[in-house]
């Protein structure tokens, strides 16, 4: 992501961060936003609300104050058919900021419960002005503990929302028993093993857990998730590993996590592998990130992408073991074939 250009005639100096909040119908997005607004402490937030039909019911339920700007999109799902309207709304908001009629510290885009995040995320990379002026911070997905199993069985978009997530918030977890919660956690983690999972109780979750986390930065943090977090407040966060009694997978979601792990790689070979991977399978790769050890450099090689939009950079030097980890969240990829090709990139 390019840095914003500083112009003394304009009111901005750094890109405006935006968080995309998604999740299936009834997951609790409006409740979480209201909790954020109640504990906002003066940060100016522009909220882009989207709903089906002419009346935005969720927007009417938000607790507004002078530090909140509501932008309503009511022509249906924020997806391919409405991406133009989203782009227009963002341009208009930037114009308000430049004219001094509104000041914003960040944007929050709440999608309708039936929205596929893919075209929404891409909208922030396609338009040149938006790409320069607005910085995508993270995709946050709310998961309804009570209903998500049924939703995944019946609605393909529910898996896509989970697959795109940088962080997953489990709601209504106090309304299900431990066995059901383990089923939910196992299935969600099988779809997206990269995203950290947090539990929220009654819509309460500190903003530091899901706002301003810099998930789209080319950072060298990457792991395969082994558990979930319970957070009473930002100072009291407990990590709990998945139960040793994890149930045998009995579902067949079309989106899943693919993990490639090895030692040192040849930089030319891994470059060719990634180029071919993105070119041939990019449309089926929702999100992917790699922290790679290459034999020609002591630093971590970081790769991160959405579909066919991909970025590479070097991070900090390795400390200790030098190993390569690539996590791809995608649809029906030929894993065994790709794993064989990935192994062929190992440095000789």
Image (cartoon, rainbow, N blue to C red):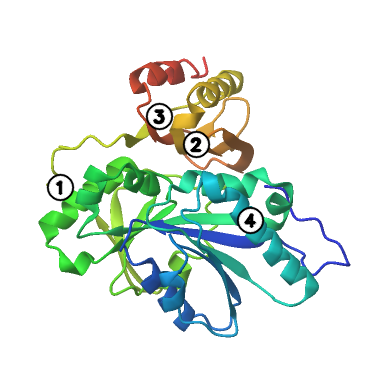
Kindly report the distance in space between the C-alpha atoms of the residues bearing marks 2 and 3. Answer: 9 Å
Question: Image check: 299 left or right of 154?
Answer: right
Label disc, if present, on residue 290 of the rendered structure: 2
Badge 1: how crowded within 10 Å, few (<14), some, or many (20+)? few
Question: Image check: 23 left or right of 88?
Answer: left
**Which residue, given by chain and number where applicable, does mark 4 sit on?**
135
User: Hey, which residue is sitting farthest front in the picture?
Assistant: 54
Kindly report the distance in space between the C-alpha atoms of the residues bearing marks 3 and 1. Answer: 23 Å
SS for tag 4?
A: strand
**Which residue, given by chain and number where applicable, does mark 3 sit on?**
260
Badge 2: how crowded within 10 Å, few (<14), some, or many (20+)? many
Q: In the image, what residue occupies the spot 13% across and 38% down?
A: 248
From the image, state whether disc 4 or disc 3 is nearer to you.
Answer: 4
Q: Earlier in the sequence, mark 4 or mark 3?
A: 4
Kindly report the distance in space between the C-alpha atoms of the residues bearing marks 1 and 2. Answer: 27 Å
Q: Are marks 2 and 3 in contact (CB under 8 Å)?
A: yes
Q: In the image, what residue occupies the spot 49% across and 30% down?
A: 283
From the image, state whether disc 4 or disc 1 is nearer to you.
Answer: 4
Total number of numbered discs in the rendering: 4
Q: Earlier in the sequence, mark 3 or mark 1?
A: 1
SS for tag 2?
A: strand
**Which residue, given by chain and number where applicable, does mark 1 sit on?**
244
Q: Nearer the viewer, residue 269 or 161?
A: 161
Q: In the image, what residue occupies the spot 39% across and 21% down?
A: 339
Q: Nearer the viewer, residue 217 or 12?
A: 12
Kindly report the distance in space between the C-alpha atoms of the residues bearing marks 4 and 3. Answer: 29 Å
SS for tag 3?
A: strand
């Amino acid at each position: 992501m390019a840095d914003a250009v500083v112009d003394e005639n304009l009111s901005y100096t750094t890109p405006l961060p935006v968080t995309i909040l998604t999740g299936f119908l009834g997951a609790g997005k409006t409740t979480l936003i209201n909790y954020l607004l109640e504990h906002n402490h003066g940060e100016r937030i522009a909220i882009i609300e989207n709903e089906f039909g002419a009346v935005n019911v969720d927007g009417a339920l938000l607790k507004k104050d002078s530090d909140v700007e509501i932008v309503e999109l009511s022509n249906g799902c924020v997806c391919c058919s409405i991406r133009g309207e989203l782009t227009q709304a963002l341009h208009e908001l930037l114009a308000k900021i430049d004219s001094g009629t509104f000041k914003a510290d960040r944007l929050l885009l709440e999608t309708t419960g039936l929205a596929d995040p893919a075209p929404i995320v891409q909208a922030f990379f396609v338009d040149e002005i938006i790409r320069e002026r607005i910085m995508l911070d993270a995709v946050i997905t709310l998961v309804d503990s009570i209903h998500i199993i049924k939703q995944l069985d019946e609605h393909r978009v529910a898996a896509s929302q989970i697959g795109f997530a940088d962080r997953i918030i489990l709601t209504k977890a106090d309304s299900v028993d431990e066995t059901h919660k383990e089923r939910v956690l196992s299935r969600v983690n099988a779809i997206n093993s990269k995203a950290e999972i947090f539990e929220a109780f009654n819509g309460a979750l500190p903003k530091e857990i899901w706002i301003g986390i810099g998930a789209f930065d080319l950072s060298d943090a990457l792991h395969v998730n082994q558990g979930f977090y319970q957070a009473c407040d930002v100072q009291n966060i407990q990590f709990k590993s998945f139960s040793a009694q994890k149930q045998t997978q009995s579902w067949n979601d079309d989106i899943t996590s693919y993990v490639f792990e090895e030692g040192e790689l040849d930089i030319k070979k891994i470059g060719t592998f990634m180029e071919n991977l993105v070119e041939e399978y990019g449309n089926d790769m929702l999100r992917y990130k790699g922290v790679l050890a290459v034999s020609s450099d002591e630093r971590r090689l970081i790769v991160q992408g959405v579909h066919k939009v991909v970025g590479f950079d070097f991070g900090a030097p390795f400390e200790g073991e030098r190993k390569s980890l690539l996590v791809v969240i995608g649809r029906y990829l030929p894993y065994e074939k790709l794993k064989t090709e990935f192994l062929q990139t190992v440095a000789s």
